[in-house]
Amino acid sequence: MSQRKRKARKSKFNVNNLPEHLRHINLSAAGIDIGSDRHLVAVPQGSDDVSVRQFGAFTSDLHAIADWLKKCGVTTVAMESTGVYWIPLFELLELCGFEVKLVDARHVKNVSGRKSDVLDCQWLQQLHTYGLLQGAFRPSDEVCVLRSYVRQKEMLTQASSMHIQHMQKALQQMNLLLHNVVSDITGVTGMTIIKAIIAGERDPNVLALNRQKECRNSKEIIAKSLVGNFRDDHMFALKQAVELYEIYQAKIAECEAAIANHLGEQPDITNDQPPESGKHVRARERIRADLDVREKLFKMTGVDLFAIPGLAADTLLTLASEVGFDMRPWKTDKHFTSWLSVCPGTKSSGGKALNGRTKRNANRSSVPHRGIIPCQKPNIVGSLLPTHSVQNRREKGCHCNSAQDRSDLLRHVDQRHDLRRSRSTSI
């Protein structure tokens, strides 16, 4: 081919004639590889003397990154990170007006030849230039604040449950079988009796007088369960467990107050009251820190979310704090259930399903929160049981929230606890 023909063909070439997936969509895109002590930033070629620079992780370095990106004319940024190292830079760049996307590392890791952080950030920048990267979901700032409060409360709740186990252990060692005669040792009856024991009361008949009228067992049975060996070392452990439990309960109350204050600052779209329905919502299911969560959520959304069976204040607050009330990031309800990791698998071959299990994911919205999972069907203990136990129950057509499942859960926890003890103790 002559040189004249080559020039004529080259002059007829137009980028706009290429398929959309081969065009440069984000010409002012940057890529950042986040680390614990340094960040590597890549900008388009020709926007500065160097296209890749390394910055530290201090706040002054983060501002330097933002200034350099503005100097290079960058408008959109894609970053890859693990842990929570990305949060400070992400929030700062958003405040500076950049479009920021947090990219899942699994989407870009299976590429050969990238063996360093420098090449990683350049590869991110190149993929983002072609518009091939999809950012992770992140709700609005107001929802993020609510999410921080709710997650803090969840962490404190999990920590306080450890001290409940310590209380049960100390009582069991003294053969005080209080947990066999009351449904919850942290209830009114249980805590009143335990505090009386710590205060020095030893007469089981006197202790049984603290029984509330709602208790199913009589005073005589409760008194029989309170005859034991009150050793000083076990009493010391019981006292400390109760004190630590009450400390965590006080901190949980502070979290609930912070959640109530934050919800009170959010705008309402209606001043109407929730409609009267056949479902009676008890006060303990809707009141948190003197705030009627049902009424507030109805005014914020215009929908009575408590009408959904199995959902109460804690579950709805968890769902609201994780995804918010704007469903536009998900195209359909199928996309939403897939993001929640509650839809069955799609692996099939020859017209037969190979695996119908839901995919394993650490998504916060599929993690149990105070015993309830915000899924299509509330499953109180299903995700905490061994996989084979849940699978066998479902194959037999049993309900996933039955009394048998609760018994299996307690037995499974006890077995794991005994296994850890057998490995760490010797006789």
Image (tube, rainbow, N blue to C red):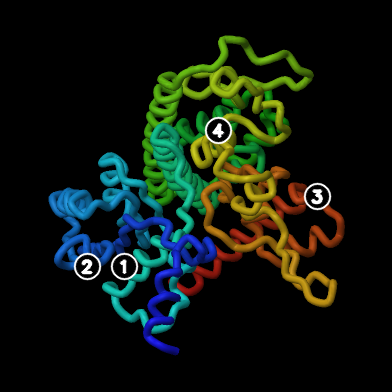
Distance from disc 4 to disc 1, alpha carbons, whole Å, reads 34 Å
Of pointers 4 and 2, the one earlier in the residue sequence = 2
Of pointers 4 and 3, the one earlier in the residue sequence = 4
Question: Which amino acid, by three-letter code, is at mark 3?
Answer: His
Nearer to us: label 4 or label 1: 1
Distance from disc 4 to disc 2, alpha carbons, whole Å, reads 39 Å
Q: Is residue 48 left or right of residue 383?
A: left
Give the residue number, with chain letter if any, for mark 1: 121
Give the residue number, with chain letter if any, for mark 2: 52
Give the residue number, with chain letter if any, for mark 3: 399
Residue at the location (70% across, 55% down)? 343
Nearer to us: label 4 or label 2: 2
Q: Secondary structure at mark 2?
A: strand
Q: Quadrant of residue 329?
A: top right
Q: Residues within 10 Å of mark 2 (few under 14, many from 20)?
A: some
Distance from disc 3 to disc 1, alpha carbons, whole Å, reads 49 Å
Question: Which amino acid, by three-letter code, is at mark 1?
Answer: Cys
- The answer to whether mark 2 and mark 1 are in CB contact below 8 A is yes
Residue at the location (16% across, 60% down)? 56
Q: Residues within 10 Å of mark 4 (few under 14, many from 20)?
A: some
Distance from disc 4 to disc 3, alpha carbons, whole Å, reads 30 Å
Distance from disc 2 to disc 3, alpha carbons, whole Å, reads 57 Å
Give the residue number, with chain letter if any, for mark 4: 325
- The answer to whether mark 4 and mark 1 are in CB contact below 8 A is no
Residue 204 is situated, as x and y percent measured from the top left of the image, at 57, 34
